[in-house]
Image (cartoon, rainbow, N blue to C red):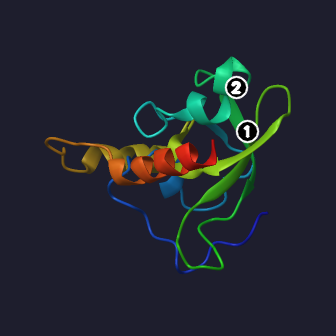
Amino acid sequence: MTQSLTTTFRTLPRYPADNARNHAGSLVGKTIAVDPVHGSDFEDVYSPGGWGPSAKEQFTVTGDNECNNPDGSGSRIIEFADKFNNIYHGNATRFTVVGTSAVTAAAAASAPAKKGYTPDTFSADIMNITRGMCR
């Protein structure tokens, strides 16, 4: 699943600098954690009925498409493993990269503070509708 970073990669300003979607370069081998805002539905998706990983766990990325999709959508889909080596797939926007570099932290610190930040709920609504249709 690992591919090289293409020139079509661009960061999305509506996500924090440490969000896995905005990480430049491959995420393979990196440790990720569930983003408390953008991954708020993590347990509903990956742990229905409590049978699956917890949002409090950290995961290791085992595959990363680096936003290179045949349809050109720019979605960053990752493959990740839990502490039991169970493999899952999902959108990188649900996660943050643990132990981001000093360069990323400095960029986040120098960015102007956003007033009234609200998460992008449009994609979550579509996901909820899709999940409801599949049940």
Q: Position of residue 128 (x, y in %)?
A: 48, 44
Q: Secondary structure at mark 1?
A: strand
Question: In the image, 59: left or right of 124?
Answer: right
Q: Residue furthest left?
A: 115
| Picture quadrant where residue 84 is located | top right
> In the picture, which quadrant includes the C terminus?
top right
| Picture quadrant where residue 72 is located | bottom right
Q: Position of residue 92 (x, y in %)?
A: 57, 50
Q: Secondary structure at mark 2?
A: loop
Which residue is depicted at the point 73% across and 52% down?
Answer: 28
Give the spatial CA distance, label 1 vs label 2. Answer: 13 Å
Q: Is residue 101 visible?
A: no
Disc number for residue 53: 2
Q: Position of residue 11 (x, y in %)?
A: 43, 63
Q: Position of residue 124 (x, y in %)?
A: 43, 47
Is residue 46 placed above or below 2 in the rendered structure?
above
- Count neighbours of disc 2 (C-alpha within 10 A) and say few if under 14, some if 14 to 19, many if 20 or more: many
Badge 2 amino acid: Pro
Residue nearest the viewer, comparing 108 with 134: 134
> Which numbered disc, 1 or 2, marks the residue closer to the eye?
2
Q: Which residue is mark 1?
A: 60
Badge 1 amino acid: Thr
Question: In the image, 17: left or right of 55?
Answer: left
